[in-house]
Image: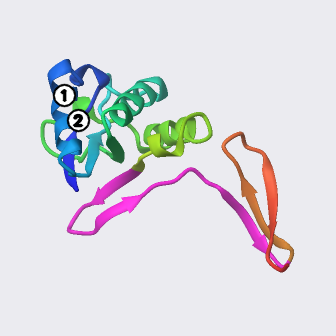
Amino acid sequence: MMSLHFSHFDELSIETKEACNRLADGGIPLGSQCVLLKGINDSVETFKKLNHELLKVRVRPYYIYQCDPIPGSAHFRTQVKKGIEIIQGLRGFTSGYAVPHFVIDAPGGGGKIPLLPESVKSIDKDGITLINYEGKEYIYPEKS
């Protein structure tokens, strides 16, 4: 897979779209990695439009990265809960193909750790109580 970096749908120019299509036509799987940036792409609507446009040119939205706490990046950083809100706002309201993984690249070589909206409320002898994208609860039976 070739990893591409798109931060906003405005980056998908006619030329960029043509290039993505040529790569896909050549058999190269394409995925997009994106850093969550304050004031640039920190809304559900921006990500929904970006991810839909990426899918049109056969690029799979793969990762949203929390902006690393590196020198000079403070003005771009959002709170982690903003990324979780974006994932929550995409799930159930757009195609599953348009919902990337929200990850933190853990400091010190810890690797990419996915952050997910809470979907498991409890597990007991009767089953698993799940919460969907609308906040509704469902019980999935443990035994058939």
Q: Is the C-beta separation of discs 1 and 2 under 8 Å? A: yes
Q: Which mark is residue 41?
A: none
Local secondary structure at mark 2: helix
Residue matched to label 1: 18
Q: Can you give x and y, in whole percent of width and height, for residue 110 in the image? A: 27, 69
Which residue sits at x=73%, y=58%? 130
Q: Nearer the viewer, residue 98 or 103?
A: 98
Residue 35: within the magenta? Answer: no
Question: Which three-letter amino acid code belongs to the residue tagged 2?
Answer: Asn
Give the CA distance from mark 1 to mark 2. 5 Å
For the image, the number of numbered tags is: 2
Task: Note whether 137 is above or below 112 in the view shown.
Answer: above
Residue 54 lies, in percent from the top left, at 33, 34
Q: Amino acid at mark 1?
A: Glu
Q: Position of residue 102 (x, y in %)?
A: 40, 49
Point out residue 114 in the picture as x, y percentages from the top left corner. 42, 58
Most foreground residue, 99 or 42: 99
Residue plotted at (45% across, 37% down): 82
* Stretch in magenta: 102-125
Q: Is residue 24 above or below residue 29?
A: above
Residue at the spot 45% in from the left edge and 40% down from the top edge: 98
Specify the quadrant of the image occupied by residue 83: top left
Reading the image, the residue beneath label 2 is: 21
Asked which secondary structure carries label 1, the reply is helix
Is 106 in front, or is 3? Answer: 3
Q: Tell me what residue is drawn at x 32 percent, y 40 percent.
A: 58
Which quarter shows the C terminus? bottom right
- Image quarter where the N terminus lies is bottom left
